[in-house]
Image (cartoon, grey):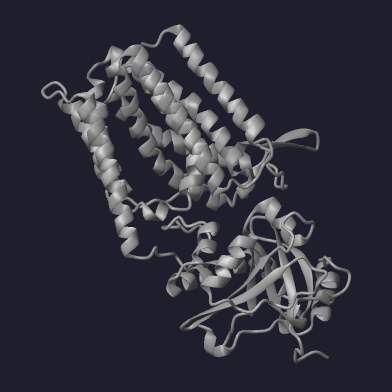
Amino acid sequence: MGTLPLWLGFNAAVAILLLLDLGLFHRRSHVVSLREAALESAVWVSLSCAFGLWIFHAHGRASGLEFFTGYVIEKSLSVDNVFIFLLIFQFFRVDPRYQHRMLFWGVLGALVLRGLMIGVGVVLIDQFAWILYLFGAFLVYSGFKMFGAKHSVHPEKNPVMRWAQNFLPLSTADAGERLFVREGGRWLATRLFLVIVVLETTDLVFAVDSIPAIFGVTRDPFLVYTSNVCAILGLRAFYFLLAGILPYFMYLDEGLAIVLIFIGGKMLGEHWIHISTEVSLGIVGGVIAIAVGLSMMSAKKRPVKTDNSLQEGSNMKTAATLADFIRLLTDPRPDQRTSAAYELAQLGRERSAASLDIWTGDEEFRGLIVREESDHSRDRQKPAFKMTTGIAVSPEMFQEIRKANQSPALADVPPDQDALEFELEFDKESLPPARLDILTTKAPAGSGAIARYLEKLGEGIQQVEIDVTNVDRATEILRARFKQEPIYPATRAGANGTRVNFFLATDASQKKVLVELVEQANQEGRP
């Protein structure tokens, strides 16, 4: 059914939609909210359904059903793409503000590469009809392999990325959202360009499953291509919508595996048993619906487990995000709040670890840091440093977290500072306490530090606090011996009578992190 005007018209419409998306609705990089992602997902799904209904009306019931079956298959398989994209962004520590733009370029490349793959597939099927049996066998194999598969990502092993690192001139500077920068009179690729490389090659691997699956539904190149493109176009919004709830889809992989085995078996047995498109669509939709339903029922019966280690390079089995951990602080179950608090505290320690390792190489500075009580430490001979992770949240989330945790007292914050805060402390046997400062702004549209942070980055880890016995001396050591200039020229008043100063430190990925040195009121040990 794919005449030249149809091909040209469809691709022109896709180009216009992509230009509007990037040039108008996402011109400014920002953190995509759940509400925004849900709205965009609804728009993309509605456009795809409208296009499918037009095919149904203009080209007949059979073509319409084939389009919708292909669309449902590709949309379902794209959930695995979302999972892997999440791991890739975590591996590279991509700023949430830039993730939508990264996905835009990733989707643009995927459209081109998948179009080429579909074209090659059409030529192969025309020349060698038996290759459909090969596709069918491959899908059956992929389906069985998907049962019990663990999601993991190892970009460092990606051969295309390794080639790019070895042969492309790369910039080590923080280039924001840019893929290329000009330094010393020549163009250099940035770290985000490597992210695009990994996204494209990963999507290509997934297309090896999904494109043969759609050929199992229809042989029409136009329907194969358009159903694939319509599913991909909504993938960016789908990512932001699903990234926070993927842990609840625990049986979806098994559902997708059954779909692949069914489509593969249909291709292998088509010569003997004909399964209509209506039946295929019913089976595919039914299997996915049952898998999602069972996942949701199971999620209600048992809490979502989180990985308390959050070590660098972890496969993040639960795929939980920073936003998930913050939301779990409002959970009515104490064990869930405790687990989330330890995850957030660990993230704070990781972000400050690179600079703290350097600073504590100085014996005097190390001696100024307050240690945890020994009975809280795994290593009785080497207690951990006393640290608190500061979490900036919206005023609404601030009240929800406070209410869920028995309304702890608000800190006494100096009136000139735009902040409300309270502290949470959680204990686990043999582990240091997880301390969190929950902060919000008094004036959401104001110019205070918390208001600016929330507007620029959204909710997240705003600072890491380190208790010291003498903030003046600690500040002087960092300034004189490490050339680390404080945010304020002199120590200032903090919450609850503390004395504080702030430093912009650098984490392991060369990103800036705000470190607050805190001297408690009536602190013993000051000279």
Answer above or below: position of 510 versus 179: below
Residue 195 at what x, y percent from top left? 57, 42
Residue 158 in sight here: no
For the point 59% across and 84% down, the residue is: 383
For the point 52% across and 67% down, the residue is: 329
Which one is in front, 171 or 140? 140
Residue 339 at what x, y percent from top left? 47, 70
Q: Is residue 307 left or right of residue 388?
A: left
Q: Residue furthest left?
A: 272
Answer above or below: position of 22 versus 345: above
The quadrant in which the N terminus is found is top left
Residue 279 at what x, y percent from top left? 20, 29
Q: Residue 486's quadrant in the figure?
A: bottom right
Tell me how many marks there are. Answer: 0
For the point 65% across and 74% down, the residue is: 422
Residue 420 at what x, y percent from top left? 70, 69
Which one is in front, 299 or 121? 299
The quadrant in which the C terminus is found is bottom right
Q: Residue furthest top?
A: 4
Residue 5 in sight here: yes
Q: Residue 297's quadrant in the figure?
A: bottom left
Answer above or below: position of 438 versus 279: below
Q: Is residue 73 left or right of residue 35?
A: left
